[in-house]
Image (cartoon, helix red, strand yellow):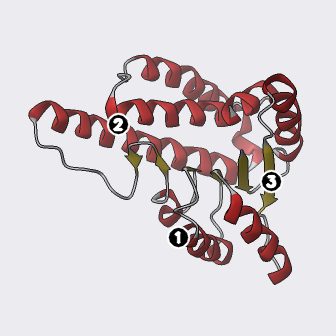
Amino acid sequence: MNITVLYIGSSLLGPLKNAEREINSAYSLELTVSAHNFGSPLSDAEWQIVENDLSVADVVFVIHVMDGENGSRLLNSLKRFQTRHRAVVVINCMPELMRCTRMGLLEFANPRTEGTNGAKQKTENSKQAIRLLGTIGSWVGKQANRGSASKGSNHGQYLKLIELLPGFLRIVPNAGKLRDVKNYLFLFCYFLQPTPANIRSMLL
């Protein structure tokens, strides 16, 4: 099992590699986690390494990627290898990348129209959940870009958001596309509190 994680920041690499080691020890999955920091433009040689990892990835995580150059190149790579990837999980990124999210029946770029009233309601619920994710992602991005002057207030709002999300998850049904929406929301919760245990759970 190969997982590629593309992110902006400096705090994920250690927890990701620790999680890889612990998961392999516990479950003998032969898991390989490849991580790349997109915090600055990559050279052609660095991009070749990214492309090599994407070409063999079963699952791809893309987190906080907003840069135009890196984002554009990544979009092309995700399209090139999309038949290889079993799931693409994009969190708080530029809209074009967000639309690349695919998990089971959940596809941000392709909301399906169903034939029965019940199925239509499920689709509408799914769209509402996706809209909520967009709101949450936008809020997280704004907090990351604000100065330290209002840090205390922002932290309080952040904790409140973390408290509200599990409650929302309890009312999302475990059926059809909504099951995959719920799985995505769980991944988002793990990302909001990126402790070593939560990063391990995110990969599992």
Residue indicated by mark 2: 177
For residue 125, side relative to residue 204 (left or right)? left
> Splitting the image into 4 quarters, where does residue 117 fall?
top left
Q: Residues within 10 Å of mark 2 (few under 14, many from 20)?
A: many
Q: Earlier in the sequence, mark 1 or mark 3?
A: 3
* Residue 79 image label: 1
The residue closer to the viewer here, 191 or 88, is 88
Residue shown at 38%/58% (left/top)? 109
Q: Position of residue 102 (x, y in %)?
A: 47, 50
Q: Position of residue 106 (x, y in %)?
A: 40, 44
Residue indicated by mark 3: 34
| Amino acid at pointer 1 | Lys
> Splitting the image into 4 quarters, where does residue 169 fall?
top left
**Separation of marks 3 and 2 at Cα, in angstroms:** 29 Å
In which quadrant is the N terminus drawn?
top right
Q: Earlier in the sequence, mark 3 or mark 2?
A: 3
Q: Residues within 10 Å of mark 1 (few under 14, many from 20)?
A: few
